[in-house]
Structures are given as structure tokens and as C-alpha cells.
Amino acid sequence: MSDPGPQNELLGVLVRLRQGLVDHSLPYEAADASVGRAERTALIRQLDDYVIPRLVQMDAPLLAVVGGSTGAGKSTLVNSIIGTAVSLTGVLRPTTRSPVLVHNPADAHWFGADRLLPDLERTDRATGDPGALQLVATENLHPGLAILDAPDVDSVEERNRALAAQLLAAGDLWLFVTSAARYADQVPWDFLKAAAERSTAVAIVLDRTSPKGVREVSSHLARMLTSRGLGDSPLFTVLESPVDEDGLLPREAVAPIRDWLGSLAADSAARTAVVRKTLDGAVVAVGERTRLVSEALRTQEHVAGQLRSDVTKAYADSLATIDDAIQDGTMLRGEVLARWQEFVGTGELLKTLEDRVGRIRDRLFNMVRGRPQPAEQVTVAVESGLETLIVEHAESAAERAALAWRSLPAGATLLEGAPGDIDRASRELRANAERAVRAWQSGVLELVRTEGQDRRATARFLAFGVNGLAVALMVVIFVQTAGLTGAEVGVAGGSAVVAQKILEAVFGDQAVRRLAEAARNDLHHRVAELWTHERQRFLDLLDAHPVSEGSAERLLELSRELEDVRWAGSAT
Ligand SMILES: Nc1nc2c(ncn2[C@@H]2O[C@H](COP(=O)(O)OP(=O)(O)O)[C@@H](O)[C@H]2O)c(=O)[nH]1
Ligand SMILES: [Mg+2]
């Protein structure tokens, strides 16, 4: 890290990695989502509070953070090391006030808010605001060393505990204070364990020890430290002694700690070694935690993909079902069938076509005399029949999409934030369906009109008219899959046979096949378009929290890059 080349590269990777973390939130509920989110937040914070500012300014003073258990005497210790009461001490718990950072006046410029711990507002006096950082400049501290007095790691107040953890994570060195009464507590050891794992530089202070128990307690503590991987950490013992009127301990009680810190401050090589140990440990931890976030992000990608395919499938299945329903005779029932039969006449279905032409002519004649045009009535019946069919299937598609989502925690959460009627067809579906069906019917008319260009004058064409031939074409496609020549022709099939015969008589059978194909395709595409709109309501919910495919891989790639640069850097 002393070589600026690899150091700049390292910084570059870390900055990109930070951006990668910022860009990828973990919006979906999943088993590892909360762990991933917590890691992501902690990582960004660790990069901002310590790793990046420290790398940018490797020659900044060494920051020793004094942390530890409640009432261990941390503030008293800080004051006594410096020789003046810079940090408030007290028996009252919890003490909520700004943490205090003590430094030599010459080092003041290193501790502005644009440097480490950027989210803590700087102040020059004691305040009760734990979101502020009180800066105290004093000649009593050697340049090159700063001391930060942190709150209790085991404070009853969550905010204090979080702040203590945040401050310790910003330290080059921990001065971890515990007392004879507290040294076996769980919380401080959790912190020390994390420090050992991350190879943070730690010195331990066993404070307020009675002369009687000092040997036993300190040797027990030393064994605990060794067995937890902190055997190399300096261990200082401070005997319980009375404090003076300023709350300070006798000078000699803290002399070994003061001397040790003083020699560190004076020795830039030793200082750099401490900074590098902690910083390198932090960088390794960044890589490890990034991999955890990447794993959680992979789950997110999977969940997002699942939710998307659930919806896509619900609507694709529904489109296939409606395609079938349009062709399998379902449509040729009730009103549509009645109006059609009225149009072509019932009873003598397959009499000669010429007869039929005569009948139809009579009907047209009737129309001219003011009776409603039968072809028009078929059109209206078809329109309302198709609309009903479309609405029904749009309802069930939405229901099924919502049901699939509800079976996944992430989908259920998304639905909670969705409009209450998302499991129904959209509000505009009915109007959209109406428009689509009408447009389709105009399209069918147009098909027939175009096909009939040079037949317009023929008696057959005239007998049915464009409208009549158009409804015949609709009827034909409604019974396409029922099989016109099948054994069980049925009423609907029979009606379709008439329609088929009429069309064939006018256009010829090949043209009829082509026209039916075109009309059916057109209807399919119009319904598909409606479905796209319906489905989009679900996809919009997903797109509001995009998890792009490959995010997890990119993050993992950055952690690998980090590893590579770190190796390159440590080899120089
Ligand atoms: N007599 C005596 N009192 C101490 C000692 N260390 C701390 N105290 C007192 O214990 C209380 C808590 O100390 P403080 O430094 O505020 O603890 P912190 O919460 O760890 O910062 C204060 O009233 C101190 O005066 C010590 O070594 N001797
Ligand atoms: Mg304190």
C-alpha cells in the first residue's frame, strides 16, 4: 500500500464497488434479504466512514477509538491520558451526548466532515446530539495521534450501541476498555471477536482493577485474549484509584498507556504499520461482505425472474385459453347463434344456395321497409359475446397472476403495495375490449369488402352484402376447431357449415380459408394487445424495484478485482 500505483487501483475498485452497492438495493422479500440489506448498508457505511477516506489520506493521524463496556471508565481514561477533562464522565446511564475526538491543533485539517465519518456533524462544544462529533484540539496530544471517546458498546440505548459500533469501525486502533467487573461480558467479546477476525489493531485496557485481584483477573483475561486470537494485542492494567476534583486518575496510573500511545505517535513507521494492519483487514472484510451481498442479490434476481415469469405465464395461458374459446364453438351460442339463425333462416339449413339468396333478398327488402337489419344484429350479438368472453378471461388471468404472486413472500409484499383491485381485470379493460372488438369487426368488413372487389356486382355478393358476408366470416372462425366435417356437427357446427357454404359460394373455398385465417389472426393480436396492457399492471410493480440480471455477478466480479488488487498491492 505504500506504492501509490496499487493504492490508487485499490481505491478505484473500492469506489466502483461502493457505487455497485449503492445501485443495487435488495427490494424483494427472500430468506437472505434482511441479512443482505444489513450487510449492504454496513458496507457502504464502512467504506464511507473509514476505508475510502483512510486510503485517500494515508498520512492522516492515527485514530485510536476508545470503546468498551458501560461505566468501564472510558471517558475518565481519555481525560487522564490527555491530562485535562475534555470528555464528560458520569455515573448517570445512559449518557447520550456527542462523541469527542481529541487531536493536536496541527492535525485539525484531517478531521473535517469531508473526511472520515462524514455523516456526523462537526461541533466544537459538548452537545447532547449523538449525531454530532465534538472536536477538541489540545497541545497535550502528540501530532499524528487522535483519540476518539466512544459510547458504551453495551449501552441500553440502541442509538448509542449503533454509534459505538460505527465509531469503532472508523478507528485505526481500538483502545478497548473493560473492567474487572465486566471483562467476561458477552457484548464486548462479540466486538473483540469481530476485531480479531478483521485483524483490526486492538489494545486492551483492564480498568478499575483492585490490587488484590489484579493478578488473577489479568492472567484470566490474557488467556481469554489468546484463545480468541488476540494474544498479540497489548494488555494494559489500570488499578482502581481515587479520581481528583477534575475526575482525573493519578498520572502514574495511566503512564504505560500514555507512553505507548506517545511512542506510536512519534514513530511514523510503527503508526503506518498499525494503520495498514487495520485497513488491510477492513479491505478483506469488504470483499467478504460484498460476496454476501452478491449472494443475496442473486436470490433477488431469482425472485424477480420468478415473479415475472409467473405473470407472463398467467397471461400467456389465458391468451391460449381465449384463443381456444374463440374457435371451439363457445361463441356460437345464445344470442349470437339466435341472431345468426334469424339471419340465415332456421329449419332448412342446407337447402340450395339459390333458395337462400332469394330469402335473404326478401330480408333485405324487409330492412328497407324499416325492419332492423339482421346482419347488424348478429354483429351486435358477436360484439357483446366477445366482450363478455374477454372480460371473463381478463378477470381470471389477473386472479391467477395474483394468486401465483401471493404464494411468494416477495410477491405478497408487492401486492400489498398495489392497488386493491389488481387481482381483477383493469378498470379500462371493458372499454378497451369494446374498442378492440369493434376495430376487429371493421377489419373483417374491410377484408370482405377487399376480397369482393370484382364480385360486388354478382347476385350472390349482393344477396348477402358486405355486412352479411362479414358476419358469416365471424361465424366460421368461431367454430374452427370444432371440425366442420366431424361426426358431431351439432347446432353450432351446422350453423357454421351454412356460413362456410355462403362464403365459399361467393369467394371460393381457398379464399375462405385465407380470409378466416386473417380474421382469426387479427382477433388474436387484438386480444394479445389487451393482455399486454393488463399484464403490465403487474410488471409495473416489478419495474418499480428493478433488479437487473447480472447485478450479483458484477458485484462478485468487483470483489474478485478487489482481491487481485490487494494481492498486487501487498506484493510490492
Ligand atoms: N474512583 C474511580 N472512579 C472512576 C474510575 N474510572 C471511572 N470512574 C468513575 O466512574 C464513573 C463512570 O466513568 P466514565 O469515565 O464516565 O465511564 P465511561 O462510561 O466508560 O466513559 C464516573 O463517575 C467516573 O468518575 C476510576 O478508576 N476510579
Ligand atoms: Mg464515557
Image: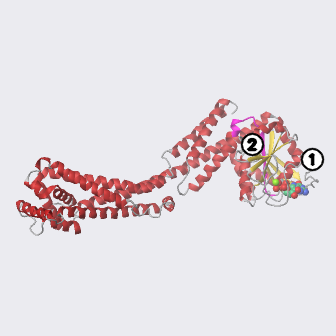
Q: Position of residue 221 (x, y in %)?
A: 80, 53
Q: Position of residue 172 (x, y in %)?
A: 74, 42
Q: Residue at x 65, y 41 (%)?
A: 283
Q: Residue at x 16, y 55 (%)?
A: 466
Q: Is residue 423 above or below residue 140?
A: below
Element marked by disc 2? loop
Q: Quadrant of the C terminus?
A: top right
In primary-sequence order, the first of circles 1 and 2 is: 2
Q: Is residue 345 visible?
A: yes
Q: Is residue 72 visible?
A: no
Mark 1 surroundings: few (<14), some (14-19) or many (≥20) residues within 10 A: few
Number of on-image labels: 2
Q: Is residue 382 above or below residue 267?
A: below
Circle 1 is placed at which residue position?
A: 251
Residue 536 circle label: none
Residue 172 circle label: 2
Mark 2 surroundings: few (<14), some (14-19) or many (≥20) residues within 10 A: many
Magenta span: 53-70
- In the rendered view, does 382 fall on the left or right side of 80? left
Q: Position of residue 400 (x, y in %)?
A: 40, 62
Callout 2 amino acid: Asp
Distance between mark 1 and mark 2 Cα atoms: 25 Å
Q: Residue at x 6, y 62 (%)?
A: 358
The answer to if 300 sits in the magenta stretch is: no
The quadrant in which residue 234 appears is: top right
Callout 1 amino acid: Arg
The answer to if 62 sits in the magenta stretch is: yes
- In the rendered view, does 568 fall on the left or right side of 461? right
